[in-house]
Image (cartoon, grey):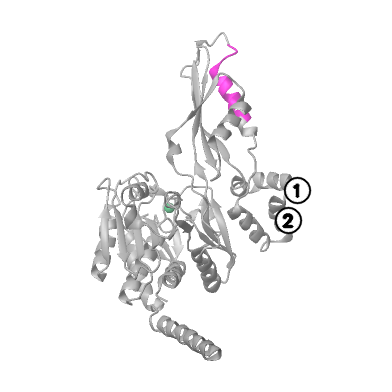
Amino acid sequence: MKLIHRLSIILCTFFIAFGSYAQTQTKQPDWTKLQEETMKYFQAILRINSSVATGSEAPVVDYLKSVLDREGIATKVFFKDPKHPNLVARIKGSGKKKPLLIMAHTDVVSVDSTKWIHPPFSAKREGGYVYGRGAVDDKDNVVAALMVMIQLKRLKIALDRDVIFLAESGEESNSSVGIEYMVKEHWSEIEAEFCFAEGGVISRKEGKVLFAGIATTEKVPRSVKLVARGTAGHGSVPLQDNAVVHLSQAIAKIAAWQTPMRLNETTRTFFTRMAAIVPPVDAARYLALVNGNGAEKAQEYFAAREPRVYSTLRTSISPNMIKGGYLVNIIPSEAEATLDIRALPDEDMKILLAEMKRVINDSQIEIVILDSNLRPAARPSKLETEAFLMLESTLNKMYNTVSLPMMLTGATDMAFVREKGVECYGIGPLTDAEDGPKGFGAHSDQERILEESINKFVQFNWEVIFNLAKAN
Ligand SMILES: [Zn+2]
């Protein structure tokens, strides 16, 4: 009895395994054939000027909707402002598992078109690249999500969970019309267990893939203003309480202040895994951060040589705007500076600002909290989830590389979704590390992506979504 039972389990397992193997074999997209179609959509989307300066993402939404309608995929459009619509497309699964959400923003940053080799909205193909504003931020993710939805539908893939595509507006300038609005007003339309969005990278240097970065958390923008007040007077009679002088001293103290270093699961794992793939001298520095031995020296190195790494070690403060005075012979009664604070996700701002007050130690300076502080500080996404492990194994399989969880120094729409308890992961296509410094990266005066890179990224998205959502 026992033996027969065991045998039947083995047989069952075999048939189940074989069954799903046969299914995945028969129902995979023909990626070579789909390259032309991918490029057609990608170029069409790039050619729509949805920059912050034009003020509307509606034409991109109209285009995406027309493509999805043609495929028979259900869509809904939601907006707080009709110029900034958000598109939701959903392919239904059995509901056995909670949905997957793929997000991509349809707006792009503005351009100075005189600086571009090829017009920024021409989607020109040249030398294996596609040029255009949004090529790597974020129309690459838009087209990848679109292609995944189309293939799931065409191949009639049986799903254990819904797959939702959200093309959101306003990411670059005003999330209150985009993700913030969707989360607050239409949460049930995008509620999911996992979400994928921009923010990751597959970094290649000198033709060799170095690592894949998966964004699992991000720093939180928290701006404040320092206001210095003093006595106004004639410039010919200098005063000790001069507001400009007191403000300058406060800024200098803040610049010299090193907020405490604090690692989290993401940064600790990032440095540990990074140490395993770089030359010993660099590895020692990363490990010093993790182990604490020689961390001071390592921090000095990163502060001077790799400011991005240094920023991920702590809550950072950058004084970026300064205002004071209006005539040379008048001592102004007020002067102010704006500080761009990027807080660690678990930062207690009350404590930080109290500490800042102590560091400045000047009764003439007031610290004013600005309203940018409404952005949520979400906890980092977990590293042991089904989705993260799937990203890791797929990256390893397709790009033969190690995955590093990353904390972004900048802010993305994922923060709003993470705050709702969704595990969010930022992904991105392969880019050459040399391309950014040459001026071809996101937000540059040029933006481009390798054609082979966009095609492979579409396939990568498919592998991840298909394997996480398919019926088992
Ligand atoms: Zn972006």
Q: Is residue 368 above or below residue 241?
A: below
Q: Is residue 94 left or right of residue 74?
A: right
Front residue of 128/205: it is: 205
Q: Main secondary structure of the magenta part?
A: helix
Q: Quadrant of residue 242?
A: top right
Label 1 secondary element: loop
- The structure residue drawn at horizontal position 39% and vertical position 58%, both measured from the top left corner, is 103
Tell me if mark 1 has few (under 14), some (14-19) or many (20+) residues whose alpha carbon lies within 10 angstroms of its own. some
> Which amino acid lies under the numbered mark 2 shown in the image of this protein?
Ala
The residues tagged by marks 2 and 1 sit, at their Cα atoms, a distance apart of: 9 Å
The residue stretch that appears in magenta: 239-253
Q: Is residue 261 left or right of residue 437?
A: right
Residue 250 drawn in magenta: yes
Q: Secondary structure at mark 2?
A: helix
Q: Is residue 154 above or below residue 238?
A: below
Residue 138 picture quarter:
bottom left
Q: Where on the picture, by quarter, is residue 349? A: top right
Residue 321 in picture, x, y percent from top left = 50, 32
Mark 2 close to ligand 1, CB under 8 Å: no
Mark 2 crowdedness (10 Å alpha carbons): few <14, some 14-19, many ≥20: some
Where 349 sits versus 141, above or below?
A: above
Measuring from the top left, give residue 151's x and y in whole percent. Answer: 35, 73
Report whether 466 appears left or right of 434: left
Residue projecting furthest to the front: 1
Residue 170 position, x and y percent, is 35, 48
Identify the residue position indicated by label 2 in the image.
284
**Residue 84 falls inside the magenta stretch:** no
Residue labelled with disc 1: 294
Point 72% across, 44% down: residue: 296
Residue type marked 1: Gly
